[in-house]
Every structure is written in C-alpha cells, then in structure tokens.
Amino acid sequence: MVASKLQPVPEQTRKGVVCPWPVPEQDAPLVEALRSGHPGAPGVLVDRYGRYVERLVVRVVGLTPEVPDLLHEVFTRALERVHEIKQPELLKAWLGSLAIFTARAWLRNRRFRRTWLRFLPPDEVPDLVAPVPDLDVHDALRRVYRVLDRLPVDERIAFGLRFMDGMGLKETAELCGVSPATIKRRLGRAQARFLAEASRDPLLRERIERGERWRSR
C-alpha cells in the first residue's frame, strides 16, 4: 500500500497565512493547484493516485527493493512536468503513461539505475511505502519475474499490464503509447515466450496447468 505522510486537509499554511482549499473531486482543479504551487496539492495527488501508480510500477518491474524509489521518481517527474498536461481532466491517464515510461527506463538501464533517479527535496514529494506480500506470494512472484526478466522490455510491460494486472487491451495500448494491433502482437509474443520459459520451473508449470487461462494450450 502506498502511504503518504501528507494527508489531504481543508487548509494549509504558507508563510503564516492560512489558505483554505477544499480538496476538489475533479482532476482539472487539482492540476491547476499543482501548477500554481499550492502547498497541499502534491499530497492530494499522491493520495488520489499513489496506489494506481504503485500497481502499474510493480506489475512492470516486480518486487524490487527499488519500487519506493521508482514511485518517488514518477511523482517527481509529474510535479516537474505538470505544465505539459494538455488535458487536465485526463490526469490519471497522463500519470499512468508517466509511470510506464519510468518503469521502462528502469528496466532498460538496470546496470546504471542508481545514477538516473532524480529527487526533489523531501518536503516537496510525500514519502511512499511499497507493499510487502506474504512469503508464498513473494516466492511465486519472484519466479514469475525471473521469467519475465528474459523477455524483451516492451513485451514484458505488455504482459504485466494485461495478464498480471488484468488491464483491458485498449488501456494497455494507451499506456504503452501504441495501437491495439501492436499491443496484440506484443502480447502474443510475450505469452508464447512466457509459457515456454515458465514450463521449465516446476512450481510455475504446476500453477499454469491448474489455472484456467492457459489450460487448453
């Protein structure tokens, strides 16, 4: 679970002046507040979309200890680039694409990943805490991501979003920035490669044989 130390509150204080600000339900006012530098806006952004961003990042990169750093990087980039949003009402989709872009960069630059993570001062981006699954789930996921490590990055991302997160084809394609036809091709290749590699692991082979998705394959 993503936890933010900055909880949405009805008012914030800047330079000793109380600034009332009811938390808006729509994304457009939130984007405007972020652009104007309202002190409560980053906390609202993380509270509203922290779990969503976390879910995408974990589905793509797995249970790496660097997940909190990646989540922090996504929101750092979001705060830096919030003025680039052309349709504020589509903030969630924009943030999701940013999360996938950040995760893809991490996968492609794992040897040098500690050098490219950039951070804002701690008081500007709320702290994030990644989830810790139970041991059985952790072992199964560790084996799955070991297999996914052997897939091309773009196929791995498509597989994680579609088959592990259960995301629809259209949303998967949109987050990856490609057409539905392209994402279908990537998923077909990713699925074939995953099944071939996973069949070599006794635990994964058993789970695949017991499951509904690939039982007939």
Image (cartoon, rainbow, N blue to C red):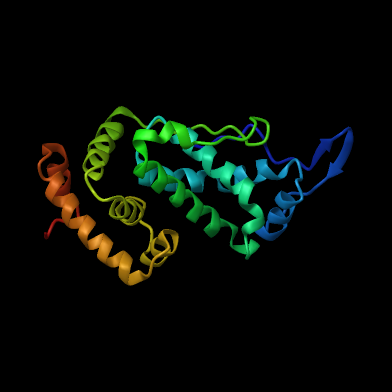
Q: Quadrant of residue 143?
A: top left
Comparing 208 with 105, the one in front is 105
In the rendered view, would you say 27 is above or below 116? below
Q: Residue at x 68, y 55 (%)?
A: 31
In the rendered view, would you say 160 is above or below 137? below
Residue 187, x across and y down, in percent: 26, 60
Residue 182, x across and y down, in percent: 31, 68
Which quadrant of the rendered structure holds the C terminus?
bottom left
Residue 173, x across and y down, in percent: 39, 64
Comparing 143 with 69, the one in front is 69
Horizontally, residue 18 falls left or right of residue 33, namely right
Horizontally, residue 195 falls left or right of residue 11, namely left
Q: Residue at x 28, y 38 (%)?
A: 141
Horizontally, residue 195 falls left or right of residue 124, namely left
Residue 3, x across and y down, in percent: 56, 34
In the rendered view, would you say 133 is above or below 180? above
Total of numbered circles in the picture? 0
Q: Quadrant of residue 110?
A: top left
Horizontally, residue 205 falls left or right of residue 65, namely left
State the residue lying farthest toward the right. Answer: 17
Q: Is residue 18 visible?
A: yes
Q: Residue at x 21, y 42 (%)?
A: 147
